[in-house]
Amino acid sequence: MSSDNCLFCKILNGEIPAEIIYESETAIGFRDINAKAPTHVLVIPRKHISTINDIEVHDETVIGSLYTAAREIAVQEGIAEDGYRAVMNCNESAGQTVFHIHLHILGGRQMDWPPG
Ligand code: AMP
Ligand code: ZN
């Protein structure tokens, strides 16, 4: 299920290149093109879902798999023990710019709280 003109669906289809470092049946992970930390990976579901507001009850397994991906990527990247942030922005006020949900996995440096 992909959506026309969605950047991340194009990465899923192979139309736009990305450095994919994780793949499962339901999700992929690739490096953010504008990294905000030494490790900055985006985890997206293979299913196009525009925002958190569009998640439906039957998507729960897919959403859960994004966190399984986060856990495995953190080990792969060597940031699991020190710690990392897993964050998903929703709509304009949170700074969402790509409307295909994605979990940002950020690590390799000290994170500030609260986020800006
Ligand atoms: P958000 O602002 O939460 O919607 O995050 C979108 C993220 O996608 C930003 O961190 C961008 O740097 C990243 N991004 C945009 N285009 C690409 C791309 N072609 N490949 C990898 N990451 C991208
Ligand atoms: Zn999409």
Image (cartoon, grey):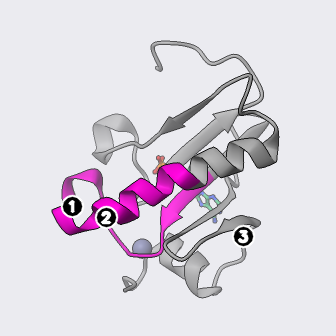
Q: Which residue is at 35% across, 36% downward?
A: 94
Q: Nearer the viewer, mark 1 or mark 3?
A: 1
Q: Are marks 1 and 3 in contact (CB under 8 Å)?
A: no
In the picture shown, does residue 62 fall above or below 80? below
Q: In this view of the protein, can residue 99 be seen by the observer?
A: no
> Tag 2, which secondary structure?
loop
> Tag 1, which secondary structure?
helix
* Total numbered labels placed on residues in the image: 3
- Disc assigned to residue 50: 2
Magenta extent: 42-68
Q: Amino acid at mark 3?
A: Ala
Q: Are marks 2 and 1 in contact (CB under 8 Å)?
A: yes
Cα separation between marks 2 and 3: 20 Å
Dot 3, crowdedness within 10 Å: few (<14), some or many (≥20)?
some
Label 2 beta carbon less than 8 Å to ligand 2: yes
Task: Point out residue 20 in the picture as x, y percentages from the top left corner.
Answer: 73, 68
Name the residue nearer the viewer: 65 or 113: 65
Q: Amino acid at mark 2?
A: Ser
Residue under pointer 1: 54
Q: Which residue is at 37% across, 74% downward?
A: 48
Q: Quick one: which residue is furthest to the top in this view?
A: 113
Magenta includes 21? no
Name the residue nearer the viewer: 3 or 82: 82
> Tag 3, which secondary structure?
loop
Q: Amino acid at mark 1?
A: Asp
Q: Earlier in the sequence, mark 1 or mark 3?
A: 3
Label 3 beta carbon less than 8 Å to ligand 1: yes
In the picture shown, does residue 37 fall above or below 73? above
Residue under pointer 3: 18
Name the residue nearer the viewer: 56 or 90: 56
Cα separation between marks 1 and 3: 25 Å
Label 1 beta carbon less than 8 Å to ligand 2: no
